[in-house]
Amino acid sequence: MPQLLLLTCLFITVTPAAPMALDPCSAYISLNEPWRNTDHQFEESQGPPLCDNHVDGEWYRFTSMAGDAMPTFCIPENSCGTHAPVWLNGSHPLEDEGIVQRQACASFRGNCCLWNTTVEVKACPRGYYVYRLTKPSVCFHVYCGHFYDICDEDCHGSCVGAGECTCAPGTMLGPDRQTCFDVNECEQNNGGCSEICVNLKNSFRCECRVGRVLRSDGRTCEDIEGCHNNNGGCSHSCLVSERGYQCECPRGLVLSEDNHTCQVPVSCKSSTVEVSIPRDLVGGLELFLTNTSCRGVSNGTHVNIVFSLKTCGTVVNVVNDKIVASNLVTGLPKQTPGSSGDIIIRTSKLLIPVTCEFPRLYTISEGYVPNLRNAPLEIMGRSHGIFPFTLEIFKDNEFEEPYREALPTLKLRDSLYFGIEPLVHVNGLESLVESCFATPTSKIDEILKYYLIQDGCVSDDSVKQYTSRDHLAKHFQVPVFKFVGKDHKEVFLHCQVLVCGMLEERSRCAQGCHRRVRREAEGGSTANMQSQMLTGGPITIDWED
């Protein structure tokens, strides 16, 4: 009789361990280009200035001819193979400090920190540094490397014992115990400066704001008394008046908010940015933006450049309580005389940074009229503010066709479809509808109000939110309603919208519904953010059956 063999199988479930984060000291990208070094001066004959627009949030290490590490002192413009070299505005950390955050500054037009961003730095056990570098907001920016002083063992007086090095004043010994890195004196008590402290190689200096001058002590500032002292701080003309002095600009330029610097007029609109540069300033130069396919057009008196927030290399960032769009107008000599008659040039290059700022917080209002007698419902005209948002009333839940000319007929318990729509679809931004409430009048401070959305949360269970492919658009459905009382024949909707960067994991938008939110976003209070009031009306109603 055949024997039966009983097999017992034991199944073991193995749960894969979570992937371990790589140590940036062993997982980095080398930056070894010789032109990155602070000794490399940019010259027009070498070609166009370089730009680090490919750098985007990875960990990097400076090696080979690029240098030992990032310089921690102000680098003059036209260094490191570009116009605006980027340096580290802060000391390098010690190994036991781990990953730290530091400010990185770009030098341009005599300003050591005209632009800035935040980077991360770590000291590695084998005596070098790695950096997590962000993508520059505009070109032409390049992260610089620097060759630091090396203390050899047979250094004749610079060593304390065998192989122990000491560094000169203004420097400190690096993690490899041989390299002397610059000390940022500005980190301690602002270097003793009353206003601006600029770190230099093995030293520092104090500076003053526009319209102010440094006193003889080299640390404190005072007001400039008149045009005889540093041209009154004016970038162009300084005129003496009965009240003192004032700055004036050449024809075609306007005085900036500091009342001392002349700048090119820039018009920031919701869909376009318009730059108008006087022809006298341009001469025989050809103007173009970061994306060189976008070029200026002359109308005889000015050269105009028009672009949108999503074209021509425009970079859009969220900075505190503002949405900042930036680009750079560059002017280079034309290869051949143009039809405009420009046959000479007076400057070899023109660089004009262009920046538009928009508030992050918006209040948008729209109105409708519900009724019990099948009366037609007239929607007021669409309204929009300085940044591209509108509140639309749609015909159905596809949210593709808003009411424009033909007016809908709605009754109580019909569905009302509305949405927050961006007029310009900008990548990298998202929105949060913080609140939506209804009032019987167009007044946003009306005492009688009914909340549909509050603190990013749906307050009325009948409100339904739809998903949208555009992170800036928000779509909702709610049954039509009216306020109690025969005199209340109108309903107005008011929505408060906040804009955030999509990659900001701790932003208010990323938090979503937060009923007891303290109204803090990225360290700032939303209550202090600028808002644009959008109110429409009046609405007319036909009560005939």
Image (cartoon, rainbow, N blue to C red):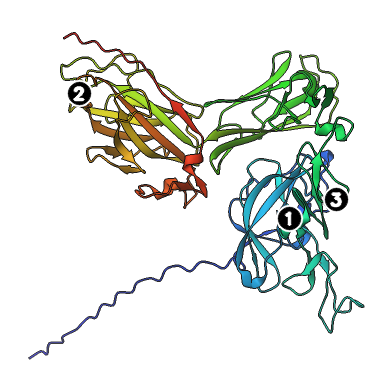
**Does residue 454 appear to the left or right of 383 in the view shown?**
left
SS at circle 1? helix
Look at mark 3 in the image and give the residue it sits on.
Answer: 218
Q: How many marks?
A: 3
Labelled disc at residue 190: 1
Residue placed at 64% from the left, 49% from the top? 117
Amino acid of disc 1: Asn
Figure check: 335 above or below 165: above
Q: Residues within 10 Å of mark 3 (few under 14, many from 20)?
A: some
Figure check: 529 above or below 331: below
Residue placed at 88% from the left, 48% from the top? 216
Going from the N terminus, do you reach mark 2 or mark 1 first? 1
Which is nearer the eye, 154 or 268?
268
| Residues at marks 2 and 1, CA–CA distance in whole angstroms | 64 Å
Going from the N terminus, do you reach mark 3 or mark 2 first? 3
Residue farthest along the top direction in this orientation: 544
Q: Position of residue 169 (x, y in %)?
A: 84, 66
| Residues at marks 3 and 1, CA–CA distance in whole angstroms | 13 Å
